[in-house]
Image (cartoon, helix red, strand yellow):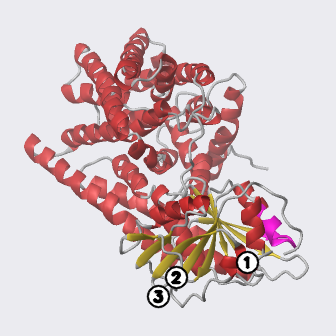
Amino acid sequence: MSLQAPEGPAWEFTVLFAIVLVGPIVVQRFRLPGIIGLLIGGYLIGPNGLEIISAGNTTIPDVGKLGLLYLMFVAGVELDLTLIQLHRRSVVIFSLLTFSVPMLFGTAVGLLLGWSAPAALLLGSLLASHTLLTYPIVRRAGLASNPAAATAIGATVVTDTLALVVLAAVAGTETGSGSTVTIMLQLVIGLVVLGLATLWLTPKVASIALRRLGGEKTVRYLVAVCAFLAAASLSEVFGIEGIVGAFFAGLALNRLIPNGGPLMDRVEFFGSAVFIPVFMVSVGLILDPAVMAEPSTLGLAALLIIACMGGKFIAAYLTVPLLGFTRDESSLVFSLTSPQAAATLAAVIVGLNIGLFGESVVNASLVVILFSVVLSTVVAERAASRVPPPAGEERPLGAHVAVAIEAGQAAEGAFRVASWIAAPEGGAATVIAVDDPRAPVIDGEVRERLDREAVAAGLDADLRVVHDSSYAHGVLNAATAAGASVLIATSGQKSATAAGGWAEAVSESSSIPTAILRGEIESLDSLRVMADDECPGGSALAERIGQRLSTRSKGEMKVERDLESIPVPRPGELLIRPVESWELLAGLPDVPAGAAVIAVPDPTPVAPIPVSD
């Protein structure tokens, strides 16, 4: 019998994924972030540890580079761009503060140490960025919509973008050939081309690809993967680091991949399970405790901590006099903008690869990351307990759209309307298909058809098949469980528009804003809203829906108050009408092909749902 020590890719990846599995669990028992376990695990199996992964191994580092691109792509996709629009003034002011102050301090440290100007600038930029590691703490406390928290979250887009631009400029001048003017001109042209290709062209191409090729879930995911890899490749054509293109691709697909949607679930799953942890482990491979313990490394780490944490603290403190935040809110801002992780590691690795940084800088940066993560977590927990949750705010209508359909019913028009409502917020969607358990008709083929139709309409929806003999119960329970912000109940076979119908029961029993859709509209050429003073709640909701849809209408929204006659919509026209009685809803004229009517019942207090349909 001849036995030999395990080796080769199978053994290396076995060890790698064992570290990914066990590392975070072990360190979390000591109340440390899971990222620390991945870094330590990488060191243990690396050339400076047990040498399971030798210094000449390129497989895991190459996968780690892919994970770095993936990390920056996910960072762009996850950002809530709506917050930037709502708090744009405070976001711009604070972004300049939280970037420029640490950038100035970090650059000064580099120059005082005798570094070259490019190395000092790169050091300043990596300290100016931040990663929203403490955002889950803020979200759990119900403070995500707090103006201070929203400002810090929105500032992430600006600070990370500026840091990546500095990184691109420094890396380009250090690795490019030719005069400085030529290299800078190439970088400017590259950034312009990259911006147009990602922020303008990529959403259009990805939208078409998702609509026409997105019948399979794997295809949708691959569209996203191709998008950020293509953007990274385009960046490198102009001498710009690929992580810049990956981040821009994430921003470009931000609206097409809504948070909470099934595609976002797959993006996050593969990222958190494979790509991003492998990148963290690959960083740990270069970790050297002997270098980290050197006085020079610890001294450099102390300087970086003072420059980074001091700059972030000053920027957060200035929000009190400049933006009117409270002291506790400024602490909340500091906790969100002080953690160093993704962008910091990205810049450090790039600096190492192009020869501006040595291993001592890498190890010192890891100390900074550890210190910032622990400090920000403690501050976030304390600040979140002191900042009161915001008063009740009206939830955006398109935050999460639920579409209720009956088994066997045509749904393309409802999917289009739901997509038009959800698009401005990049909202998620849930399709609720109610099937009678006594005579079920929804099988795998029907599920696939509904999934294809939803994707073709531009809706990234989670399909929920509800088996309930009461359509009202099934729809209401599923919509409530999904956390729907608006419910579109389609008019179908079970007398949805008649008194006693299931749609009536849903609207009367639900606190979710509800609209009844009739017709199959294909193109929104014109939009009319009928207002009724005797139905104030329904009229208000009708105008909200109209305003949301007006961004997709080819013509202006018309608001009419003449209700003596009930107009018949023309093909291409959508009529939104409040109704104060179900008899009036049942008496609406037939809707011609290509048109639609949305009937909005006046909201009523929650009442028991009738048993009969």
Establish if 453 lies above or below 185: below
How busy is the neighbourhood of tag 3: few (under 14 within 10 Å), some, or many (20 plus)? some
Badge 2 or badge 3: first in the primary sequence: 2
Residue 475 visible, this orientation? no
Kind of residue at badge 3: Pro
* Residue found 54% across the figure and 44% down from its top: 276
Q: Which residue is mark 2?
A: 521
Q: Which residue is mark 3?
A: 571
Viewer-side label of 1, 2: 1
* Residue found 39% across the figure and 15% down from its top: 310
Instruction: Confirm whether the magenta stretch covers residue 422.
Output: no
Report, in whole angstroms, how far the alpha carbon at label 2 lies from the one at label 3: 8 Å
Viewer-side label of 2, 3: 3
Badge 1 or badge 2: first in the primary sequence: 1
Residue 367 visible, this orientation? yes
Kind of residue at badge 1: Ala
Decide if residue 336 is on the left or right side of residue 607. left
Residue extending furthest toward the right: 438
Decide if residue 504 is on the left or right side of residue 558. right
- Viewport quadrant of the C terminus: bottom right
